Image (cartoon, grey):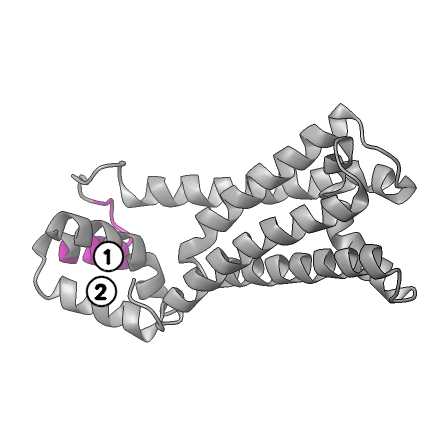
Amino acid sequence: MKHKECQIVQDLLPLYLDGVCSPASAALVEEHLSACEECRVLREAMEQKEPLPDAKWEGGDLLRSLRRRIFAVFAALTVMVGCFCLNAGGAWEGGPAEGGHLAVTLAYLLFWGLFTVQARRYRPLTAIAFWVSLITFISAAAGVWWRLTETGGFLAPLLAAFSAVPFYGLRWAMDWTAVYAAAAVISLAWLLYAGRQRRKLLGEEPI
């Protein structure tokens, strides 16, 4: 149990030292530091910008783990933006997608999932994950409404475009109504996950 607690506290230390973690997380860190010599030494080294002591927990030292996480976040965002651009033309035309568009959509889904998971400990990134998921869900729901009722004027297709572009590859095997429905289900799952992580960071749930 102590080993697991050390891992959590060592992940939170950069946020704690920068003063940007939630009050609940800060209290958890302070309580653990009062009883753990190894984590206190790590905190002092980080405060003084000295070389970190050899880490004994699984996964390597903290800074290397943070670098990997930051790289994963930016790589995921880069791929997502690229996928959005690659599918924009096909979504605008609205016809059936080709296999390449399907691959682009699957890459978008994979890397959006990677971004959402990697961002879970960082409040600003978790906020991005939450709001983009919410906007995508609203967009997809507007698309379903528009396709089923043929109402909404120019506003419904305009809102639906935000989900139509990244999910366009699903037109390889579905009509637009099914694409929007799939986008709504997937974005709702992202939204629930990102919302839960956001509540944790804000201190409404235990870490």
> Image quadrant for the C terminus?
bottom left
Left or right: 115 in relation to 138: left
Position of residue 41 measured from the top left corner of the image (x, y, whole percent): 15, 54
Are circles 1 and 2 on residues that touch, CB within 8 Å?
yes
Task: From the image, give the main secondary structure of the stretch colored magenta.
Answer: helix
Residue furthest to the top in view is: 99
Q: Secondary structure at mark 1?
A: helix
Q: Answer with mark 1 or mark 2, whichever residue precedes in sequence.
A: 1
User: Magenta part of the protein: which range?
Assistant: 40-52
Q: Secondary structure at mark 2?
A: helix
Q: Residue at x 67, y 56 (%)?
A: 136
* Closer-to-camera residue (196/27): 196
* Closer-to-camera residue (182/162): 182
Callout 2, which amino acid?
A: Val
Position of residue 196 measured from the top left corner of the image (x, y, whole percent): 43, 62
Query: Which class describes the residues within 10 Å of circle 2: few (<14), some (14-19), or many (20+)?
Result: many
Number of callouts: 2
- Residue 29: which numbered mark, if any? 2
Query: Which class describes the residues within 10 Å of circle 1: few (<14), some (14-19), or many (20+)?
Result: many
Position of residue 67 measured from the top left corner of the image (x, y, whole percent): 41, 42
Q: Is residue 68 above or below residue 154?
A: above
Q: Is residue 57 above or below residue 163?
A: above
Q: Is residue 49 magenta?
A: yes
Q: Residue at x 91, y 64 (%)?
A: 154
Identify the residue position indicated by label 1 in the image: 9
Q: Is residue 51 magenta?
A: yes
